[in-house]
Image (cartoon, rainbow, N blue to C red):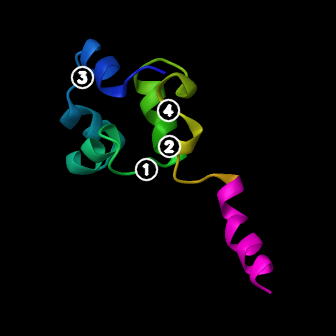
């Protein structure tokens, strides 16, 4: 896995420029990059497109906000409590 900040910097893109391209706040982008906030799949895909690399090379699936297996977890837990 490549580090997002390294790839972005190598391409000469600032955090502010990346945030503007994604139409999000710079602070939000910084949180994505620093792992303080989970990144939605659609934003991850846009980032990968901007950086010209596959999304899998920058992000692990667990970093995405939306994961299909997580959506089923509350139902499984509720069923176990009964």
Would you say the residues marked 2 and 3 are in contact, meaning their CB atoms lie under 8 Å apart? Answer: no
* Distance (Cα) linking label 4 and label 2: 6 Å
Nearest the viewer among 29 and 46 is: 29
Q: Residue at x 71, y 74 (%)?
A: 77
Which secondary structure is most common in the magenta stretch? Answer: helix
CA gap, disc 3 to disc 4? Answer: 18 Å
What secondary structure is marked by label 3? Answer: loop
Q: Secondary structure at mark 1?
A: loop
State yes or no: discs 4 and 1 in contact (Cβ < 8 Å): no
In the picture of the structure, the residue carrying the numbered disc 4 is 59
Q: Residues within 10 Å of mark 4 (few under 14, many from 20)?
A: many
Q: Mark 1 — residue?
A: 38
Callout 3: 10 Å neighbours few (<14), some, many (20+)? Answer: some
Q: Which residue is mark 3?
A: 13
In space, the residues marked 4 and 1 are separated at their CA atoms by 10 Å
Q: Are marks 1 and 2 in contact (CB under 8 Å)?
A: yes
* 78 falls in the magenta region: yes
Task: Give me the C-alpha separation between circle 1 and circle 2.
Answer: 6 Å
Residue 54 coordinates in the image, percent (x, y): 55, 22
- The residue mark sitting in front, 2 or 3, is 2
Q: CA distance from mark 1 to mark 3?
A: 21 Å
Between 29 and 24, the one lying in front of the other is 29
Of labels 1 and 2, earlier in sequence is 1
What whole-number distance in Å separates the C-alpha atoms at marks 2 and 3? 22 Å
Q: Which residues are magenta?
A: 69-82
Marks 4 and 3: in contact by CB < 8 Å?
A: no
Q: Position of residue 9 (x, y in %)?
A: 24, 19
Q: Residue furthest front?
A: 81
Q: If you read the primary sequence from the N terminus, does the residue marked by circle 3 or circle 4 appear first?
A: 3
Residue that mark 2 sits on: 63
Q: Which residue: 53% across, 46% down? A: 64
In the foreground, 21 or 14 = 14
């Amino acid at each position: 896995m490549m580090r997002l900040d390294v790839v972005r910097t190598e391409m000469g893109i600032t955090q502010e420029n990346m945030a503007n391209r994604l139409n999000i706040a710079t602070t939000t982008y910084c949180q994505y990059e620093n792992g303080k906030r989970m990144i939605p799949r659609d934003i991850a895909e846009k980032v990968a497109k901007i950086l010209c690399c596959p999304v899998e090379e920058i992000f692990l699936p667990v970093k995405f906000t939306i994961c299909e297996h997580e959506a089923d977890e509350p139902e499984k837990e509720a069923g176990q409590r009964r």
